[in-house]
Image: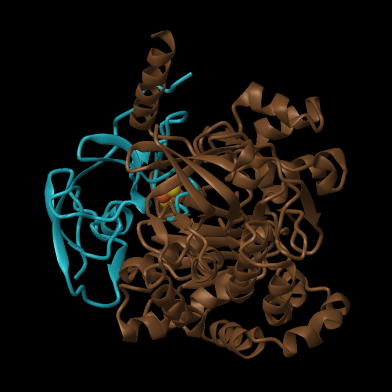
Chain colours: A brown, B cyan
Amino acid sequence: MSINSVDVLVVGAGPAGLSAAIELSKRGATTMLIDEQAQPGGQIYRGVELCGESDRKLFGYGYVRGRKIIEDFRQSPIDYKTRTVLVSIESNHVADIFENGVLKRVQAGAIIIATGAYERPVPIKGWTLPGVMTIGAAQIAAKQASVIPSGRTVIVGNGALLWLLAWQYRNFGASIDAIIDLGGRKQISKLLRDFWGFAASSYFLDGAKYYALSRVSTRVITARDQVEILGDTRVEGVVVMQKNGKYQKFAADTVLLHDGILPNTNLLGAIGCEMLWSLSQCSWRPKVNIWQETSVSGVFAAGDNAGIDGAIAAEYSGRIAALDALRQLQILTSQERDTLAQPWIRQRSRARWGRNFIDAYFSPSNTVKTASDATIVCRCEAITHESVSAHIQQEPRRLAHLKSMTRCGMGPCQGRMCSPSVAALTAQISDVHPYQVGPPSHRFPVSPLPLAALAKFDVGLSQDAGKLHE
Amino acid sequence: MVMKNDTGTTATFKRFSPCNNTVTIFVNGREIVASGRDTVATCLLVAGELAFQYNKASGEPRGPYCMMGVCFECLVTIDGVPDLQACLVPVEPGMRIETQKGVLQGRDT
Ligand code: FES
């Protein structure tokens, strides 16, 4: 295996990773950026380079902004590797990456992890049926290739992204038959406290517009009880059950789910970064200092994987992480770093305005808590709510036991589709706070390598082994 | 244009703007004109495929859920290589895609 040496390895080509890489290369650091996708932009700016100008505008200003960042990125001297995943990191910042079927070793002076966020799983009965996908997935299909549902579409869930998509669908001419709002009752007193920060933020005008327009132009049903998706081999409809035994049915060809987004921390967890529980966002995030450096020296977390702050804050946090990495590499002095960082640190906090309000307004519904027994919790291994609950009751708070007994969390998604639900259930059943359940444990490789890859890895290893025997 | 899949089911996805450049690919042997911007997952949805594979533990049909590489529900066979994430792979001219329906592969232990 050849060893590549770079000053900084950046993981993830969303707003944080791109901004970090641009800043690093501008100041003379050799920079490698690896990303799982074939095109830069992460999920928020997915497909923005190839999307026609008039289409781009239909997504709103938040999307158009990505174009400029990617233009800057394309002009920077960065070793950009697409369709590449990080396999593992050893001490001394030695990373194994998997690119085009080949395993390569990279020695980096510092590592910036910018793996963004993913959507909180929404376990309700029938959510594994073909034709059910997330709001984020629907947005990605639209950004990637202008793909939208053509049949009857029902949205179920809660969160800011849901209302943004509803507004974008209006622009595309996609019809929505109903929005089943799982948002629950709002705590007015708590909301008022954070309202002024929101009113002064960049989210206020646009956000309020998306929300209000979608609410008045679509049939919105507030559901406080159980919701189930109907269908045999594909989705056929949605049923909203009420406490008094009445129910309302909606026929559907496509169902889109959402319950907010979570930092994608698998990589950071596997590296051994210390995690903190965010009370306002109900999720784990790495502990970072003002420079976005984690508890592991020289390893930075920038963008939404360090806590959900949105795309604009992500840009600044990426640049700020880059500045401290440059100082660690002795390309900048502490003084130079501080001077350059000052305006960005201000901008980063400014971009966070309004976040508390959004978090409180759309606090997660955690549908797993009210899901019926037969609801699948672990999608990969098809393990039900009933079976997960039974194990938690038997062996409270021993998640390792649950894994070994049921294979829950052992599938290819590496627990990302079940661990938030398992933690919420554990907290509910054992009557403890979610943070007492602890962060999920992660090990390398955080995404499974295709068998073909492992075969090639073996070849590499056996060649080395052969040398040892000589 | 709304497409139908092999079994005659009408597609439940379409495009809201026309494709500027197209590529021809094969889905379960059927010739499909895809957008040059498509991933394998987006083009399968427009071609009327909703179930991409059967879950290896339960045998239930599954289709793409996250479209961003997290859930592994979109596994298909591309040019003979099984279990690839359709949502991460851009389409390429002449690509042969097989949904993994009915292919219940043995689970690894
Ligand atoms: S749809 Fe989730 S990994 Fe492809």
Q: Looking at the image, can residue A302 be seen?
A: no
Quarter holding residue A197: bottom right
Is B63 situated above or below A462? below
**Residue A2 image point, x, y percent:** 39, 36
Viewer-proximal residue among A4 and A201: A4
Q: In the drawing, does residue A232 fall left or right of residue A200?
A: left
Quarter holding residue A417: top right
- What residue is rendered at 74% in x and 62% in y? A281
- What residue is rendered at 46% in x and 56% in y? A33
**Residue A48 image point, x, y percent:** 38, 73
Quarter holding residue A358: bottom right
**Residue A424 image point, x, y percent:** 74, 46
Q: In the drawing, does residue A296 fall left or right of residue A375?
A: right
Q: Looking at the image, can residue A290 be seen?
A: yes
Q: Quadrant of the C terminus of chain A?
A: top left
Q: In the drawing, does residue A144 fall left or right of residue A155?
A: left
Viewer-proximal residue among A445 and A187: A445
- What residue is rendered at 69% in x and 74% in y? A336
Is A183 situated above or below A436? below
